[in-house]
Image: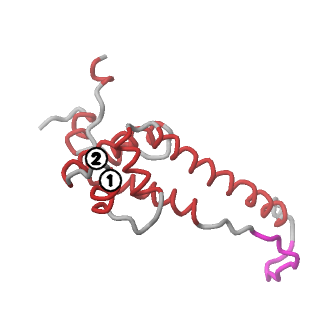
Amino acid sequence: MDEALNLPKLDRRKTQAAIEAAMEKYRIYKTITFEEREARITSSYSETRSGFTGTTSDSTGQAAVYNVDMPAARAAYCERIERIVDRLNDRERLLMRERYMKQDDVFDYKVYNHVFDPPISKDTYVKVRTGAFYKMALTLSAAGLLPLGDLLTKEAVRKKSGRAE
């Protein structure tokens, strides 16, 4: 029972890379406009013999489904990331919003020197960021958006598989 309550040990670098990739995807979805697909109105020539293939092609239907589903999926992803960030504590939330959710050209030193009031040291900033990444990785994993097994440390993988050296 106690083993089920233990939180997994995550590799810090892999976790940082995964969370930064998720936040980059968030920024792209928020800033890049969605381009709708248009249905083809002319048929294309094909040298294959005509006959029943068991499939139907409905380019208008496919375009319509894509034009409805993709913006909805993008909006749902962004909303989920925002809800996860809203659950973090005040310092972590401020860090994630200012560094990863606003602009591409914001750097760590700008955040810990100019955004935090009072400014914090680089080491404190790294601790806050590491805590935020850990919490976000666990939450994204629970939501099915991030495979947690890829982020485990080698020690955690060995413990999980039952092999101790």
Q: Please, what secondary structure does the residue beneath circle 2 have?
A: helix
* Residue 70 point in image, percent of width and height: 68, 57
Q: Please, what secondary structure does the residue beneath circle 1 have?
A: helix
Q: Is residue 117 left or right of residue 155?
A: right
* Labelled disc at residue 16: 1
Report the residue marked by disc 2.
130
- Confirm or deny contact between disc 2 and disc 1 (CB under 8 A): yes
Q: Is residue 127 left or right of residue 76?
A: left
Residue 128 on the magenta span: no
Please tell me which residue is depicted at 41% across the width and 44% down the height of the picture. 93
Please tell me which residue is depicted at 19% across the width and 35% down the height of the picture. 163
Front residue of 115/162: it is 115
Say above or below: 60 vs 157.
below
Q: Which stretch is magenta?
A: 37-50
* Residue 151 point in image, percent of width and height: 32, 47
Residue 46 on the magenta span: yes
